[in-house]
Image (tube, rainbow, N blue to C red):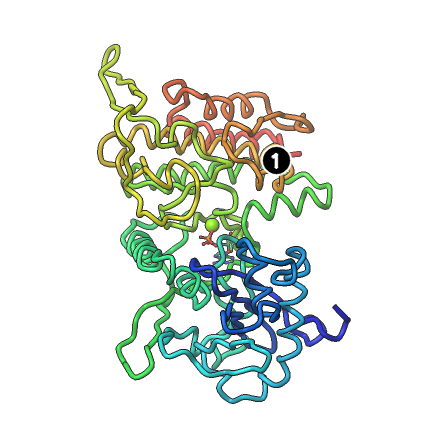
Amino acid sequence: MGEHDTPEALGVQSEWIWGNDLETIVFAQVFGHGKTLIFRFTLDSKQQPQSLTTRIVNCYHDPTVDSASATLPDRPSMRTAIWSAIAAVWAKCSEQPAIKDPDVIIDVYDTVSTDLPSRITHGGLTSLTRLGQLGGRGCTTLVHPVSNPESQFVFKGIDFRTFLNLYESGHIKEEVKIYYRSVELVSSMPPHPNIMAPANALVTICKTGDDRPVVCGTLHALLPNGNLGDHIEKNNDSGEQIPLSCKALWCYQMAAAIAHTHFVAHTYHMDVKPGNFLVDADHNLVLIDWEQSDAPISTAAPEIDDTWDVEEIPAEGLTTTLRYTKYTGPERRNMPENTPGNSGWNVWNVFPVWNDQCPKALELAEVFSLGRSMWMLLRQPDMNAFEDITRTTEVVEDWASSDDIPAHWKKVVQDCLKHSPNERISLRELVKFRDSARHEVKTNGLSS
Ligand SMILES: Nc1ncnc2c1ncn2[C@@H]1O[C@H](COP(=O)(O)OP(=O)(O)O)[C@@H](O)[C@H]1O
Ligand SMILES: [Mg+2]
């Protein structure tokens, strides 16, 4: 690709490439000059197999093709072809008034059309401008209201790209349901200083020709210091240790947020990891991301795959213990058929089941996730190393370069991470320990 036919040369950014389930379309999204544009490349059986759009679609979906000329040599060539094609049509597209419409899709043929397919009527954000994608699974976006370009907010919800992406797989209804449920959950939860407050505003869309607004997202205040996972990475990149007093405070705040979730709100989080704790302006942690639909492989407790059942049974004195039994019945599913992900909990999710039948088991599962998250904070390992793991048991919690971490803190992390849930420290004990540890750092000056 020559330097003039890249999106970057036009001052726009290539953001996403995705395909449809029928394997006949490839979409690509670019962002720049205050606009987010989605381009569509369609396999057209009437076209010559060598047409560029057909080769792009074939390369993306990788069906068996008769000749090498019906596809492209590899993914990098495909990306180059997509971005070059977009760069080539960009100038012409930008002149079209229709480009400003929020629900526009630009079909890229040999010529360009901006005609909207009639079946797509969902719009994007009519009075918000996207400023860029934030981390996570992709629907969390930095935006500013058109009327006030100076202010910035975080949009979370179902954007147009997500809608297009999930519409065809049939998962869009489920995704909307999950999202609405999370908004309701946060709105009805008693407040806690380490849990993100409910959204400031709802974002709505109207279908063309219909003035009834539909909620498609929420707007949140932008917290300036990012998430804890990124914070750890940033410190690692610059070779710095996060101060021990900060680690002490944040370990306490993580545990306090989860204790509130279980003991006051009587629910669970399911996605406890450093990336879901934001660092606010006063350097306190706040827990976000309440979809309760997927768990992070890097911090998930081993027993939450789909193979265990559990019950709480009386033990010595007034105590109880948990009895786990391997499930041997026919295949079972409580998650929708087309749920993304390959983990056991994407098929049989124990969280809602145990929340009703055995909340103690969920408490201990989240103690494990807290232990992993605390280890990540205290040890500051390379956070990128967790992106490719396929099982939680692949993570090895070593304590290299952690001489400044007190031995009793390390022991309590190990107590959270016991393979057998019955041997783990309870959530109440964990909060108590972390509460006294943060005071200990303050009064004894353990701070590094
Ligand atoms: N209010 C906010 N302020 C600043 N950054 C945020 C805010 N909300 C989310 N983010 C960033 O976006 C990322 C993804 O948001 P999250 O709600 O966790 O969505 P996902 O379901 O995609 O993981 C977070 O890890 C954080 O970096
Ligand atoms: Mg998240």
Pinpoint residue 25: horizontal percent, then vertical percent. 49, 65
What quarter of the picture does the N terminus occupy? Answer: bottom right
On the question of residue 281 being in view, the answer is no
The residue lying furthest to the top in this view is 316
- Local SS, label 1: helix
Q: Give the vertical position of 234 relative to 320 (above or below).
A: below
Give coordinates of residue 183: x percent, y percent.
Answer: 32, 57
Choose top left, top right, bottom left or bottom right for residue 320.
top left
Residue at 29% x, 19% y is 323
Q: Residue at horizontal 56%, vertical 77%? A: 109
Asked whether 96 or 331 is in front, the reply is 331
Image x and y of residue 204, in percent: 34, 72
Disc 1 residue type? Answer: Leu
Residue 79 appears anywhere in the view = yes
Q: Residue furthest front?
A: 66
Q: Which residue is mark 1?
A: 244
